Image (cartoon, rainbow, N blue to C red):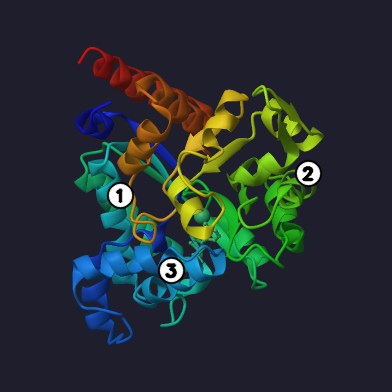
Amino acid sequence: MHLSDILRAPKAVLHDHLDGGLRPATIIELAREHGYDKLPTQDPAALGTWFRDAADSGSLERYLETFAHTCAVMQTREALERVAAECAEDLAADGVVYAEIRYAPEQHLERGLTLDEVVDAVNTGFREGERRSGGRITVGTLLTGMRHTDRSAEIAELTVAHRDRGVVGFDIAGGEIGNPPARHLPAFQHLKRHNCHFTIHAGEAVGAESIHEAVQVCGAERIGHGVRITDDITVHEDGTATLGHLAAYVRDNGIALEVCPTSNLQTGAAKDYASHPIDLLRRLGFRITLNTDNRLVSGTTMSREFAHMVEAFGYGPEVFEEFTVAALESAFLPLPERRRLIDEVVRPGYAALRQG
Ligand SMILES: O=c1[nH]cnc2c1ncn2[C@@H]1O[C@H](CO)[C@@H](O)[C@H]1O
Ligand SMILES: [Zn+2]
């Protein structure tokens, strides 16, 4: 599959962090405006490389340290609007037709914004970015509670309050070790009471028990990463595999895994692309979606993730169509909107690609 075809292919991303995907030049400009003087360099290209290299640490905790610089410049209404608008533009330019972008509102209160103002600013930015992209992309947001703080119940309430106004669901993120998802049970119970969607980062730095808790105790509809479900799968010498009860449950219920290969290599959740479990899981029938996680921090785009998969596993357009349809089927959008995107945008887009 050629690069130009990859770029043209319609894509959907369910797992992309707003604060992990800023343009380097924007960070530098905003840092000047805000008087933030801790950036490692003032050169956009060097800053992009710095993030990717600093995040290439083999540990999730060190990967997450780099977000101090992006969050530092996302503290005003104008900055949040700009970052969100540019995010939508960059994704649309990469062929993304549907995106769920997540961020933690509690990390944007340093200069006096309220949680509601943060959410409104981000939503305004996304509407502007959609408009500038000529309506080629639809963006919904997920509000993230941080696993190591105690504001998740409040963020869950914020999610319910802003549902149907740009916010489509909830997530928890941050260091996984020592912060099991069930610690945030009141947040999930609140969302369930209000019939709200949520996903949970699990099975990235901790193994199957974290996925079990996220799915069976907390009730997650999708799993962020989830690649360590392989802990519950035995692959035999002849290539066949036996699934444990958890792996079978996740597969058989079509619980989508939001797989982010490049990010997994950086945090040590996988060794290299060729041995990344995405291909095994796909062959076993798991519902796989392909995602960026953090475009700046992981030095990636949806097209780059596609290209890595072409190189590692020889995937062609039919597999990317499968991933894209899976993402839309698991999107936190009303069913008619998912169907419209699949039938009117994704299927015709791949059909056109096949015709050359
Ligand atoms: O892959 C990840 N695993 C866990 N947490 C993450 C990941 N990527 C980003 N964040 C965390 O989510 C926050 C809100 O967007 C980010 O600030 C970062 O700390
Ligand atoms: Zn993530």
**Marks 1, 3: nearer the viewer:** 1
- Find residue 273 and name its label: none
**Marks 1, 2: nearer the viewer:** 2
Determine if the C-beta at disc 1 is less than 8 A from ligand 1: no
- Seen at 40% across and 61% down, the residue is 20
Is disc 2 surrounded by few (<14), some (14 to 19) or many (20+) residues within 10 Å? some
Quadrant where the N terminus lies? top left
Q: In this rendering, does residue 157 appear at all?
A: yes
- Find residue 88 and name its label: 1
Q: Amino acid at mark 1?
A: Ala
Among numbered discs 1 and 3, the one appearing first in the sequence: 1
Q: Quadrant of residue 123?
A: bottom left
- Seen at 33% across and 52% down, the residue is 126
- Seen at 35% across and 58% down, the residue is 21
Mark 1 in CB contact with mark 3 (< 8 angstroms)? no
Image position of 204 (left or right of 264): right
In front here: 295 or 118? 295
- Find residue 216 and name its label: 2
Is disc 1 surrounded by few (<14), some (14 to 19) or many (20+) residues within 10 Å? many
Among numbered discs 2 and 3, the one appearing first in the sequence: 3
Q: Is residue 343 above or below residue 9?
A: above
